[in-house]
Amino acid sequence: MWYYQITNGNKVTDNMKTKNKEKTNMKKLWHYTSFDRLVNIKMHGKLYPSSSNLLMPKGQMRVRPSRYGTGFYEIYDDTSDYKPVVWLTSSECPDSNALGLTHVKTQVRMLFKTDAEPWSKFADENKMDKTWRKAIEKGRKPDTWFVHEGELSLDECEDVQFRADDGTWTSIL
């Protein structure tokens, strides 16, 4: 369970109780996010899946309230709800281009021990269109991408860190 207190609109004081579980064949992977989304993730106690990008977008892009009632809005199209996943990476460096992230989503990183599968295996198993896949992966580091199908509980989170302006990371646990 997570406990947090927000002060001055920015500062978060955290204390996390974790369950020590025996885990086999698990990987330690990072999930990058923004400060605003971290607060929301903690309120809900889990990460919700987002678009898997397996299908090339079709039709007009639209905006809707988050389907999970998080208070955020999401951009979506007719393919956004196909096989949603939580995105993770083996990269300890939040290279926004390599990971396909906006700069804001590199403020916070969360370390999970999970059975996520490599993006390449997931894309292959789901017979992703090769041209679309090449477009998504071009100039990035897809070998560092992993996906977890379904929600990911914060019980699986081992650490949460904030990135300072000088690029150093500080654990809040």
Image (spheres, rainbow, N blue to C red):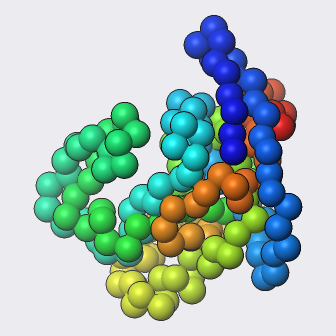
Give the image location of residue 26, x and y in percent.
77, 75
Q: Residue at x 78, y 41 (%)?
A: 16
Q: Residue at x 22, y 58 (%)?
A: 77
In the picture provided, is 89 more to the left or to the right than 82?
Answer: right
Give the image location of residue 44, x and y in percent.
52, 43
- Residue 75 sits above or below residue 30 on the image: above
Residue 35's quadrant in the figure? top right
Residue 104's quadrant in the figure? top right
Q: Residue at x 23, y 43 (%)?
A: 64
Q: Which image quadrant: the C terminus?
A: top right
In the picture provided, is 124 more to the left or to the right than 28?
Answer: left
Give the image location of residue 163, x and y in percent.
74, 33
- Residue that sits furthest to the top in the current view: 8
- Residue 102 sits above or below residue 118 on the image: above
Tag count in the figure? 0
Q: Which image quadrant: the N terminus?
A: top right
Answer whether residue 65 is visible to the viewer in this image.
yes
Q: Residue at x 56, y 51 (%)?
A: 46
In the picture provided, is 120 more to the left or to the right than 171?
Answer: left
- Residue 81 sits above or below residue 48 on the image: below
Give the image location of residue 29, x and y in percent.
73, 63
Residue 5's quadrant in the figure? top right
Answer whether residue 163 is visible to the viewer in this image.
no
